[in-house]
Image: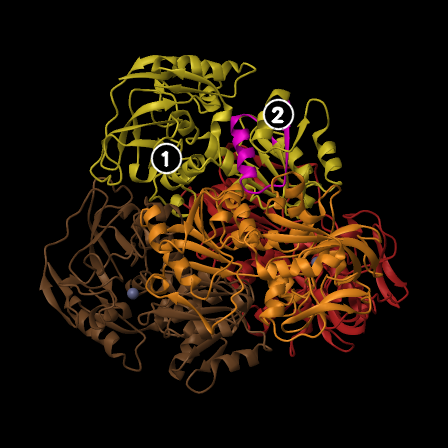
Chain colours: A red, B brown, C orange, D yellow
Amino acid sequence: MKAYAMLKIGATGWIEKPRPVCGPNDAIIRPLAVAPCTSDVHTVWEGGIGERHNMVLGHEGCGVVDEVGSEVKSFKVGDRVLVAAITPEWNSVNAQAGYPMHSGGMLGGWKFSNVKDGMFAEYFHVNDAEGNLALMPEGMDLADACMLSDMIPTGFHANELADIQYGVALSFFCAGPVGLMAIAGAALKGAGRIIVVDSRPDIVEIAKAYGATDYIDFKKVSVVDEILKWTNNEGVEKVLISGGGSTILETAIKVLRPGGKIGNVNYFGAGEFLTIPRVEWGVGMAHKAIHGGLMLGGRLRLEKLARLIMTKKLDPSKMITHRFKGFEHIEEALFLMKDKPKDLIKSVVIF
Amino acid sequence: MKAYAMLKIGATGWIEKPRPVCGPNDAIIRPLAVAPCTSDVHTVWEGGIGERHNMVLGHEGCGVVDEVGSEVKSFKVGDRVLVAAITPEWNSVNAQAGYPMHSGGMLGGWKFSNVKDGMFAEYFHVNDAEGNLALMPEGMDLADACMLSDMIPTGFHANELADIQYGVALSFFCAGPVGLMAIAGAALKGAGRIIVVDSRPDIVEIAKAYGATDYIDFKKVSVVDEILKWTNNEGVEKVLISGGGSTILETAIKVLRPGGKIGNVNYFGAGEFLTIPRVEWGVGMAHKAIHGGLMLGGRLRLEKLARLIMTKKLDPSKMITHRFKGFEHIEEALFLMKDKPKDLIKSVVIF
Amino acid sequence: MKAYAMLKIGATGWIEKPRPVCGPNDAIIRPLAVAPCTSDVHTVWEGGIGERHNMVLGHEGCGVVDEVGSEVKSFKVGDRVLVAAITPEWNSVNAQAGYPMHSGGMLGGWKFSNVKDGMFAEYFHVNDAEGNLALMPEGMDLADACMLSDMIPTGFHANELADIQYGVALSFFCAGPVGLMAIAGAALKGAGRIIVVDSRPDIVEIAKAYGATDYIDFKKVSVVDEILKWTNNEGVEKVLISGGGSTILETAIKVLRPGGKIGNVNYFGAGEFLTIPRVEWGVGMAHKAIHGGLMLGGRLRLEKLARLIMTKKLDPSKMITHRFKGFEHIEEALFLMKDKPKDLIKSVVIF
Amino acid sequence: MKAYAMLKIGATGWIEKPRPVCGPNDAIIRPLAVAPCTSDVHTVWEGGIGERHNMVLGHEGCGVVDEVGSEVKSFKVGDRVLVAAITPEWNSVNAQAGYPMHSGGMLGGWKFSNVKDGMFAEYFHVNDAEGNLALMPEGMDLADACMLSDMIPTGFHANELADIQYGVALSFFCAGPVGLMAIAGAALKGAGRIIVVDSRPDIVEIAKAYGATDYIDFKKVSVVDEILKWTNNEGVEKVLISGGGSTILETAIKVLRPGGKIGNVNYFGAGEFLTIPRVEWGVGMAHKAIHGGLMLGGRLRLEKLARLIMTKKLDPSKMITHRFKGFEHIEEALFLMKDKPKDLIKSVVIF
Ligand SMILES: [Zn+2]
Ligand SMILES: [Zn+2]
């Protein structure tokens, strides 16, 4: 089959690969649409997960079931399905502990374009298909469906990690596409005030459309001073992080109230350590909780998030700025994510 | 001072009473607006809490601080304040256990128009003012402010009791004003499908404006059959109850999935027992949790819910169908709640 | 193979059956020890789950792996393993929701001696073996191992359902073998006062050995009066239920404080309804939570509970009153559970 | 009155001070027993909280009510009472948020010997006496009662922060008196394996008496290597920290499984930053939660923990190595905590 792959660190290209083999619990999917992701860019051009050779890229997409294993009962050939970027083994010990994304070891649920081939191909393989596929609701837009793989569940998970409650004030760091979904997820958990910290004024309007109430340009003012000023020197109750360097936790802790929580879904790519400011962390006793985690995948999650789209409570299409038609545009869509033109938030390729 | 009171079961009227006395932890409030409540109707005409004589009615309102005790530091004479219907003793054992509404005993936080005079007067008394008042945000509409006393926190609490999560399907029983706020609260916790069960088609539109997605008229179809049909015979994940007779729990359990939760904020007024259907409750082992509770009051709660109004995430005014201007209209507003004309959802009196 | 079966309601006996077949995710186990359970008695002589023909009985046991399917990686032939009474499909939607015991529908994780053959045979079948087996720790007593199938996880789950916290006072209804494990589990969650309600004075000593602090004989005094007297009329914070008729919830609610929780693991076998006393349930608003659920099975659970035995934090052997040596004694051991002689708590058959 | 005070950083001595004044919500207590604490040592000789002049020391003790304010209803002169080291304002916003220890600001519940005079005096003052006193159970040993002020609630809180569940494996850093109570608290939450990391072999026996199952001497072996070896390279599920320098979090994160939790009650006294190792923290996505917090005080907490002592589920006396009789021995008891002779764990002075 034809596939678009990471050839080695720094290089991508079209390759031929055998169609994946379907085990008893597996499914083979023919993609209908896929989306490139900033983490594809990390993987290829920054060597984020180390060297790989001829590994098919892509972990965001949806498709049609082309084959199922003997033990798969809930899906059949021809079904249109949603697939998450994270595909755990659901009978693993870590899944039983409530952390399926770490099945088989830390971050072990992340398989596509990491420990096996990804979705930018004529076919891709899904392990534990009973647990990892969900039927695509009739009438769902294919580009929206792709947002259910990673952008929505990752952004929403930040809110779960920070345990958002009715009316809390939170500050939110970095409004890329995950960030916008984190904002939408904060609004859908009843946050009362959502302060976005970013440096692109052009993203403010869409952030507001997703529920943001205030905006700080970190290039112009001191984030800590500004948030403390706005909150009567008390700080915010929650901080969500979906981007930023290795000192972002410091800022987060400084603007957090005692009893506050940080929900991080950012991939920290550099440095030996992240740092916690000792005094502002209450010398260890301020109840400022630091949570960070990989998104949750799986059938139930996909079904529930899809429901929010179908009942129009969530509209991911506002952030899809570039749509391509045709498998052959994958390269163009990926390079767009790499080059980040000003008007780009998220690109999708519909086959 | 002049006050509007329950004279005895079945009778109300204007009376003269001494202005309340302010202890060291108390505040005396001069109301700016008040709202009559269905529970005032229960109290007077159904004897819901037993006999009372010349007890001032009213537990929903906002006002201006007229006097504070020596130990009250956060509020001063002239401050405009929000007050909840439930005013706990915050240093009680039950408050420390996380149940301030039961301070001093079951439902003990409910004091206004129950164990002391209520708000339909020239002045009313607030115990533990540090914990039970909140500053009214500048620019807040006085009628909206009254909804923060009971309708919003009660409706929202149903969602907390049922532990609503992203994308769940829920059915909601009874769409009065508390019910509408429960629907709004479900949307603000990310519910994916909100099925309203009621018999007034005229309330459907406003329910949808607050986030409802589906409607069942329980006078026309079988609620259980309909919900099971709509959910592929699996049932919904949550049931919220803000009205209904003593068999409503039965219906709730029948439409609930295993692992589902019921959040009840309904006052059950009749019968010796509520009933749980044994088989549908999984002979005791279905993990269908039954939760019911009185709303939470207090400063923090008021501040957080007020924030939702000020950032336009919640608009209680859609359900305020009748507004009166002048203290003297309290009787009219109350009788409206008693007589329930078709176009009534909630009435407010602004002084 | 030889097996001991329910022939029909009211009749048991030895039968010949084919050895079960092993699918790709399955394992076939040769039992080393099994234990009959009160629910085997319900099944056979009370028709608790309806008619069955020649169904092998038994859901408590441990054994040796005799065969594994192609997809089973963590276990191999010859491994000694623990098996829980409940064996879910871990990739099901309900398992993903945190309720594996309801995989495939309400109580769907209960397969042994319900929807398929049980353990009283030369071999038995385990579905989803990766998720449902656990290695037996070296040196574990085989009878103790059998208690990990049902008695310990069921008794302990009552405490999870009631959310026991440091120092709470609880009353516990019915001290059979599950009950004793519920008491042990309460002590291991830091309960401060554990009031046992039962009618067998002979079980008091062993209940105290497991952590009970007080005893009420419900045949001699009013349980409600006694508990209220002992708790200064406030009631207890938690009630655990592992036995009792259809009115036991009433008693539980009457002795519960506002904000209290009921953890039920009792199988309610009779009556159309269970009843909640309206007034003591705070007319719907007392925050007296009613939780009931089937035990959790699975590898992680078995590993964790086994650890408590191996580090001597839990000693299930105190309640094993009758030990038989030899497969052929299964019938005798089962009839003992049926006839309930005074000195019986739990019987085990070691092969 | 006579009192033992911090004169300035580095100096202590006996002084005369006026008896404290009792406001409407306050109580004045005459101590019956007190205990010096390592944090008194930090305060005086390390300047841990900055300069203070003639501030009475001591935050662990129990006593007799000598006077109560007009609003105090639950306690009267002559009552023997327990008092926690942390005495929040229970009607504060942070208390309503579930964080009373931060009432009025970060760590704001810590008043004794910090922002007001402590307990080493003929009389001491308790704010919000309704919420901060508890009746001492009849027959309670006075030295045990002192352990309820700080050692027990602080040690136990580590377990709450780490959310200990049945059967988890945990490692525990630093077995001083708080540490021993953390171990006891872990056993009382059902931990399955409790690995103590310390360097004093003499404390091992008492740690085992409180529930420890394994011991690592960090001066002899690599803690990380040892714990990973013992846990099959998977790490432990929880880490409790009650001592250690600013790199202890690094070790904790390295030995923690994905999905694990850290519960810190250590006071970090030095350095600008604490450090999180980026890779072992899963580049931000391992769900290794970092929790740290000041103990919870208050009446309910004291009542519940006292219950554990009275029902013999917890015996703090095993760690009280030095008992003095007479107020005048306070200095000697304090210097013992400063000089830390090998046989010292905790000293108490009974008046
Ligand atoms: Zn992605
Ligand atoms: Zn009301």
Image coordinates of residue D34 in percent, x first then y, are 38, 23
Q: Could you tell me residue A191's position as x and y percent? A: 47, 57
- In the rendered structure, does residue D191 fall within the stretch colored magenta? yes
Residue indicated by mark 2: D204
Magenta stretch bounds: D173-199
Number of numbered discs present? 2
Q: In which quadrant of the rendered image does the N terminus of chain B lie?
A: bottom left
In-front residue for pair A170/C185:
C185
Mark 2 falls within which chain?
A: D
Numbered mark located on residue C28 in the image: none
- Decide which of tag 2 and tag 1 comes sooner along the chain: 1
Density class for disc 1 (Cα within 10 Å; few <14, some 14-19, many ≥20) is many
* Quadrant position of residue C328: bottom right
Q: Nearer the viewer, residue D347 or C334?
A: C334
Query: Residue C152, image x and y in percent?
Result: 61, 51
Which amino acid type is marked by label 1?
Answer: Thr
Residue found 87% across the figure and 66% down from its top: A21
Residue located beneath label 1 in the image: D87
Asked whether residue B21 is drawn in magenta, I would say: no
Split into quadrants, the picture shows ligand 1 in the one at bottom right
Q: Is mark 1 within 8 Å of ligand 2?
A: no
> Label 1: chain?
D
SS at badge 1: loop
Image coords of residue A307 (percent x, y): 59, 71
Give the side of residue A103 with respect to residue C189, left or right. Answer: right
Q: Residues within 10 Å of mark 2 (few under 14, many from 20)?
A: many
Look at discs 2 and 1 and give the one toward the viewer.
2
- Residue B223 left/right relative to B343: right
Task: Tell me the kind of residue under disc 2.
Answer: Val
